[in-house]
Amino acid sequence: MRTKFFKILFIGCFSVGLLSCDKEKGKEVSPEPDTEFKFIRILVNDEITKQVSLVDPVTLAVTNFEAQYAKTALYGTQAGRFGAIVATSNNHLQLFDTGLEGHGDHVDVKGTPKFGALIGDSNKPTHFKSKGDEIITFNDGDGTLSVAKQGDFHTPGSKMKIINAGNVAHHGAMTKFDNGTYAITEKDGSVAGSLPERVKIIDATGKTLFASTVQTKGIHGNASDGKVSLFGSSSGILVVESSGAQRLVAHPQSFGTAWFGTILEGKGDGKFIGYSAAVGAYLIDVKLNQITPIIESTDLIQVKVDYAGNHLIALLHSGEVKIFDLTTSAVVKSGSVLVATAKDETQKPQIEATSRYLYITQPKSGEVLQVDIKDFTKKTKIKVSPTPYRLAILGIESSEAH
């Protein structure tokens, strides 16, 4: 009997081995799990209170923390481990550590979730970017940049370093190139108001490496793939290369006076998404100088690129969500997920998405709605703070531990 038992066990293991080989060859063995990735977290802040909620979307556990200020902007760092909480009117930046550190094929857990020690106390930090292990803010109050490295995030008493590029105060923005230089807006005073008109390239000391060669009638919105940076402008899309070369790409004639005040980064070199509430969302291909529609609509609340960078998620006032493949611009999923939101509503739902789920704030009920991307009827309500304001996806799309 024992001999037969081991034969059966051996055959069973051999069969499993064959199934594993089939999987390696690209044959689907089992369906995708009906859960979120184990190492994804959702950070949610509040409009009225200082409460910050960290949601584990697999267990649905919610851990609450208290930030320095309410009604702040939330961002994730490029590596996914940290979130940034930016209080512009209070001249303050805090970092939040999920404790999840990605290592390519697996994720390590580095302690428990907590606030970092580093503080940003610059003059109206407004625009945030993360590149590699560095975080950057553009400070509207004086036109400077503030930067810090991840290695200092838990160093007691550490503060962000100021880079002074000789700017005046304005509502500006910046990007960082792969070669370590920065593209930063500047205001020459040719247009009334707070918007800048030009972009120059500086080094880490603030020294100008390449002066602006293109003047616009106002800039807002920016993105970069590390090689080229795009800035939204009423004069056209300003393309700035790390070499210093600059040019404008014209908007479609149908735009009239509309222009992209928001630029998002898609996955892949030279692919970006331009967004305007007046016309919708468009794919921008800077290599071909082409602007093609993804969704043309005046009913959009938000458009967001999903966490993996493969899809554009569009949330409409009607309560409908449309998901577009950024490779083809084709709709891959659409359907109603919410009741309609009035266009004059003061606090509207905010949306983010992983490859598996949508996450949408519900400001009136104090919840975050988790929606299965494969089946919009599968919804889970997660109670967070009284009036959820913004949310950010943190962590890594992985379930593989060390």
Image (cartoon, helix red, strand yellow):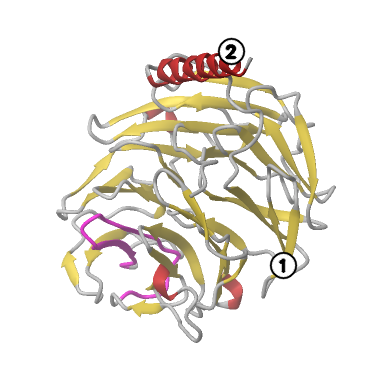
Q: Residue at left 77%, top 65%?
A: 48
Which of 337 and 255 lies nearest the eye of the viewer?
337
Query: Can you say whether 188 is above or below 395 in the image?
Result: below
Query: Can you say whether 401 is above or below 207 in the image?
Result: above
Residue extending farthest to the bottom is: 157
Mark 2: amino acid:
Lys
Q: Residues within 10 Å of mark 2 (few under 14, many from 20)?
A: few
Q: Indicate the quadrant where residue 192 lies.
A: bottom left
Query: Can you say whether 124 is above or below 247 in the image?
Result: below
Residue 65's disc is 1
Q: Name the residue under label 2.
A: 4
* Residue 120 position in % (x across, y down): 50, 77
Type of secondary structure dominating the magenta stretch: loop
* Residue 261 position in % (x across, y down): 46, 47
* Residue 251 position in % (x across, y down): 35, 35
Q: Residue at left 43%, top 34%?
A: 256
Quadrant of the image containing the N terminus: top right
Is 114 on the left-hand or right-hand side of 137? right
Q: Give the range drawn in magenta.
A: 167-188
Q: Residue at left 35%, top 53%?
A: 217
Residue 3's disc is none
* Residue 85 position in % (x across, y down): 58, 65
Mark 1: amino acid:
Phe
Is 44 on the left-hand or right-hand side of 148? right
